[in-house]
Amino acid sequence: MYPLRRNRRLRTSEAIRSLVRETIISPNDFLVPLFVVEGKGVKEEINSMPNYYRYSLDLLEQEVKELWQLGLKSVLLFVKVPDNLKDNKGTEALNPNGLMQRAIKTVKNACPDMLVMTDVALDPYSSYGHDGIIENGIVVNDATSEVLAKMSISHAQAGADFVAPSDMMDGRILSIREALESEGFINTGIMSYSAKYASAFYGPFRDALDSAPVDMVDVPKDKKTYQMDYANRIEAIRETEMDINEGADIVMVKPGLCYLDIVREIKNNVEVPVAVYQVSGEYAMVKAAAEKGWLDHDSVILEQVTAIKRSGADIIASYFAKDVVKLIS
Ligand code: PBG
């Protein structure tokens, strides 16, 4: 008797396909990255990220209300810092009335139940475009960790629910956890960018925040001494396990699509939620191909976020969050 099993039976109609579907995308899966700028009434499209914007605080308020209506309940904040406020030590990051601190309050005022996560790294504040302090041509580790811990306290004081260190310094999760505990922020969480690779896919993001490493002598040209080598897999597990031991509540793999093998492996190895960041370059590629008519935008983004979730992501940070949620509602 040939064939005994016909796998196509389970694919014959949409009804049976949806009955046996293993991975379902919902608004609960998403973390929405938001870019914030100074000013009033500002909604600027980012050049290399079509249909994605930087918002001034007044329009940020509208945007988060719209996200909430759509069922998107978590945001990840990034700020574009004016050049005159940048320095080597990221001093402005600690300003209690800085743009990030005001952005946190704005979101919490507009939508008190919205989960607010904040990016913790020096690059938007650094005159050199690096995630840490530079001394003698080197991004120094421990002094940077200290600033990141203070920055985390400042975000917690402004009302952040989670801080998200994206810098890849060694030991920073422990410094941040200890600082939060000692200041009484026992319920402020840490989502650690644990396995963050030195990736060319961050290009459009650096346009968005004007935060790329500057071309100067004694300034490293890239972030390869702190972000991971994309050829490595086992190292990602070590980084992630260390972050969990240091107190990370959620771990992250970044970028997304090229790194789904890492996501699956980490998901199989750890007992905390795993987040994946589908980064700016991944967004830009789809937009560009769709603009040319070479790919079907909506189908491609649904396929991509489903693949990310299937690979083991519990949380997806994505610039497509709003588009996807509209498509599935
Ligand atoms: C900053 C930071 C970056 C991203 C998130 N946080 C850029 C970088 O490390 O250079 C990238 C996000 C994206 O590309 O969408 N530490």
Image (cartoon, rainbow, N blue to C red):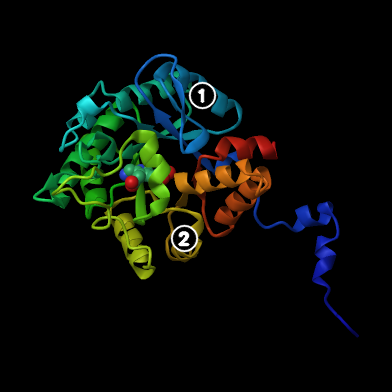
**Residue at (22% x, 53% y) in the render:** 171
> Position of 272 compared to 181: left or right?
right
Q: Secondary structure at mark 2?
A: helix
In the figure, 97 relative to 130: above or below?
Answer: above
Q: Are marks 2 and 1 in contact (CB under 8 Å)?
A: no
Q: Quadrant of the N terminus?
A: bottom right
Q: Earlier in the sequence, mark 2 or mark 1?
A: 1
> Position of 213 compared to 323: left or right?
left
Task: Give the quadrant of residue 203.
Answer: top left
- Provide the residue designation for mark 2: 259
Real-space Cα separation, disc 2 to disc 1, in angstroms: 30 Å
Q: Amino acid at mark 2?
A: Tyr
Q: Position of residue 181 (x, y in %)?
A: 24, 40
Q: Amino acid at mark 1?
A: Glu
Task: Give the quadrant of residue 146.
Answer: top left
Q: Secondary structure at mark 1?
A: helix
Is residue 184 in view from this perspective?
no
Which residue is situated farthest in the bottom direction here?
1
- Provide the residue designation for mark 1: 63
Where ligand 1 lies, by quadrant?
top left
Q: Position of residue 321 (x, y in %)?
A: 56, 39
Is residue 275 in view from this perspective?
yes
Residue 311 or 133: which is nearer the viewer? 133
Which residue is situated farthest in the left direction here?
136
Label 1: how many Cα within 10 Å (few below 14, some 14–19, many 20+): some
Which residue is situated farthest in the right direction here?
1
Which residue is situated farthest in the top direction here?
40
Label 2: how many Cα within 10 Å (few below 14, some 14–19, many 20+): some
